[in-house]
Image (cartoon, rainbow, N blue to C red):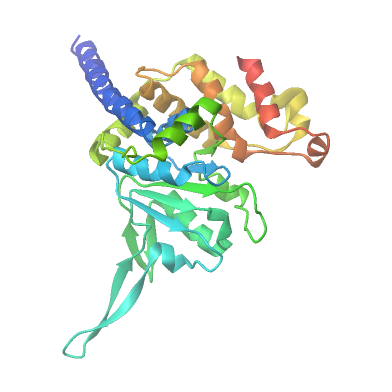
Amino acid sequence: MAGADGVEKLEDVVVRSAEQLAGHVRAAKAAISGVIFGQERVVDTTLVTILAGGHALLIGVPGLAKTKLVETLGVTLGLDAKRIQFTPDLMPSDILGAEVLDESGGGRRSFRFIAGPVFAQLLMADEINRASPRTQSALLQAMQEQHITVAGARHELPKPFHVLATQNPLEQEGTYPLPEAQLDRFLMQIDVDYPDRDAERRILLETTGAEEAVARAAMTADDLIAAQRLVRRLPVGDSVVEAILSLVRSARPGPDGGDLGSLIAWGPGPRASQALTLAVRARALLDGRLAPSIDDVLDLAEPVLKHRMALTFAARAEGRTIAEVIGRLKSRIG
């Protein structure tokens, strides 16, 4: 009986903390929506990525408030936010930091580490594909390992640590596309589209006047860490686990994909299943629910899988797209 009572008490604690943290998260979402207009899905998906403890790749043309979104997230979530503009001449030390030689009054010399902008809780990597592969890999290694090594010395990154990288789908001249293995470090690829007419009217009226909406804090870094821990404790039903497995496995070349398997050149690995499992839990918490549903799996499938798979040359020649293939794979589950 004592064991059963212990389980009940643990469930009560989870429920109470979930209700409290869900309130914080909803307040953060409302605060962000008061500054960023017409991008509700982008805001939701970005918050899900951060609650799941991951990094996001935002893809959209200039002028769609990607930079403003990151700045607003930093203020609203109580995170130390920094921004790096990636350019072809950016060096790894410009991101990570470097050791400099100090000389004291007595003529003694010693090295001192000067931290780079990567030492932030929320880092915006603007136009990440404009930097050289060497510089990209310096950041992507930090994203994966949560620490950096300079001159043989290890330096831990702050917690939480999230990277929101942006890419412009236009002007691909002089860019260095991210390799597939490095794209896999991003929990989600979020496409930022043009706002609808009503949202754009609101943008016109509210951002060109004498007073402009200002972001306000709704959470602290400690609140966010607590929410991320809670996300990992939320239960996932067997039907949701099976839906995730079926979807991810069918997105690979081979028999699991059925007739669509022949269109896929390579597909997502187990990291995609992990990412989708965390993302659906985070989505449930954002909506104030204690467990994810199959609808969450279907809703988040595309941003989690899109950058982790590629079509064959023949499929691309026929005009097939990854979004279309994912849509057909989802229809088998839904």
Observer able to see residue 50: yes
Q: Position of residue 39 (x, y in %)?
A: 48, 32
Taking the view exactly as shown, the residue that stands out farthest to the left is 106
Q: Nearer the viewer, residue 300 or 80?
A: 80
Left or right of 106, for residue 292: right
The quadrant where residue 173 appears: bottom right
Note whether residue 38 is visible: no
Which quadrant: the N terminus? top left
On the picture, is 167 further left or further right than 8? Answer: right
Q: Is residue 219 left or right of residue 84?
A: left
Asked if 288 appears above or below 139 in the picture, the reply is above
Foreground pick, 34 / 289: 34
Give residue 334's position: percent from left, percent from top: 60, 14
Q: Nearer the viewer, residue 34 or 93?
A: 34
Q: Give coordinates of residue 267: x percent, y percent.
A: 65, 37
Q: Residue at x 30, y 70 (%)?
A: 113
Q: Is residue 326 above or below residue 292?
A: below
Q: 47 or 2: nearer the eye?
A: 47
Tally of numbered tags: 0
Name the residue located 38 percent from the left edge and 67 percent from the top edge: 150
- Which residue, as the protein is rendered here, is positioned at the far bottom? 107
- Residue placed furthest toward the front: 210
Q: Check the image and report above or below for 153 versus 54.
A: below
Is residue 176 toward the left or the right of residue 311 in the image?
Answer: left
Q: Position of residue 122 (x, y in %)?
A: 36, 47
